[in-house]
């Protein structure tokens, strides 16, 4: 009910959607810069990238197979690093631009496929949270309305009790002023009981 309304900037909304393309494009550009600076057909550079990519993939496999089901975030990070190193190695080693561009398209497609899964999960969690919040608000609003009705009823009963007591006191005063009034007869008959405002 008293939540702040925060309007996110369009850049903040678009950043997660363009992040996979920016990441793969950056790796491709850096690989081509590396190619232009002497990595083309360099066996040592290719071997280095193969070792680094294989090491990252091995770390991802160990992280995924760890105790208790493994650490998914660490495994995903290691596999993404392995893929990025492989893409950079091919982009740096290859002659032309066609193979690196083909791998860039493939890597970008895979990155968006993986990201879309997480976006769906995040959206599902957000929708579930909003539903729970709405249900909680409705429950609290219902309780609040019931308490307001109960308090208004108690106030009305108290007002009626006060009005009844005032009318009774006024009637007794008027009656006491009448000729032939016997207060002892009234005491013997008993006064009517006042209503309890707490009931």
Image (cartoon, rainbow, N blue to C red):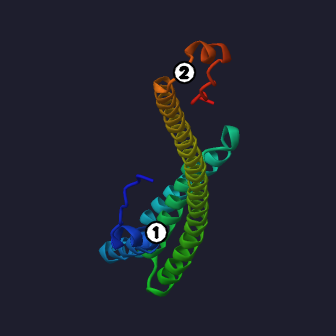
Q: Secondary structure at mark 2?
A: loop
Q: Which residue is tagged 2?
A: 181
From the viewer's side, name the closer residue of 60 and 85.
Answer: 60
Whether residue 58 is visible: no
Residue at 57% across, 64% down = 123
Q: Position of residue 72 (x, y in %)?
A: 60, 50
Identity of the residue drawn at 59% across and 53% down:
138
93 on left or right of 188:
left
Above or below: residue 190 compared with residue 17:
above
Residue nearer the viewer, 90 or 74: 74
Observer-nearest of 174 and 118: 174
Residue 77, position as x, y percentages in the image: 52, 55
Would you place residue 4 above or below residue 21 in this image? above
Q: State the residue lying farthest toward the front.
A: 179
Decide if residue 116 is on the left or right side of residue 20.
right
Q: In this figure, what is the number of numbered marks?
A: 2
Residue 5 visible? The answer is yes
Badge 1 element: helix
**Are the two marked residues, 2 and 1, in contact with CB atoms closer than 8 angstroms?**
no
Q: Is residue 42 left or right of residue 73?
A: left
- Where is residue 154? Give x, y as percent: 55, 37
Residue at 43% from the left image edge and 63% from the top image edge: 44
Residue that numbered label 1 is attached to: 89
19 vs 140, left or right, is left
Is residue 155 or residue 128 the one in the foreground? 155
Residue displayed at 40% across by 73% down:
14
In space, the residues marked 2 and 1 are separated at their CA atoms by: 116 Å
Q: Residues within 10 Å of mark 1 (few under 14, many from 20)?
A: many
Q: Quadrant where the C terminus lies? A: top right
> Looking at the picture, does residue 3 appear above or below residue 119?
above
């Amino acid at each position: 009910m008293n939540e702040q309304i925060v309007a996110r900037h369009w850049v903040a909304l678009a950043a997660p959607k363009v992040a996979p393309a920016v990441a793969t494009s950056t790796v491709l550009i850096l690989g081509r810069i590396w190619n232009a600076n002497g990595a083309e057909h360099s066996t040592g550079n290719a071997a280095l990238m193969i070792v680094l990519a294989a090491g990252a993939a091995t770390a991802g496999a160990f992280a995924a197979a760890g105790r208790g089901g493994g650490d998914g975030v660490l495994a995903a990070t290691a596999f993404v690093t392995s893929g990025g190193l492989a893409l950079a190695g091919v982009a740096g080693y290859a002659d032309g631009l066609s193979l690196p561009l083909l791998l860039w398209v493939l890597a970008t497609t895979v990155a968006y496929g993986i990201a879309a899964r997480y976006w769906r999960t995040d959206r599902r969690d957000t929708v579930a949270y909003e539903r729970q919040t709405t249900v909680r608000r409705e429950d609290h609003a219902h309780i609040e309305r019931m308490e307001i009705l109960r308090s208004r009823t108690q106030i009305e009963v108290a007002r009626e009790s006060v009005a009844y007591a005032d009318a009774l006191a006024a009637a007794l005063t008027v009656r006491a002023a009448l000729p032939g009034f016997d207060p002892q007869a009234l005491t013997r008959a008993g006064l009517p009981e006042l209503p309890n405002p707490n009931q």
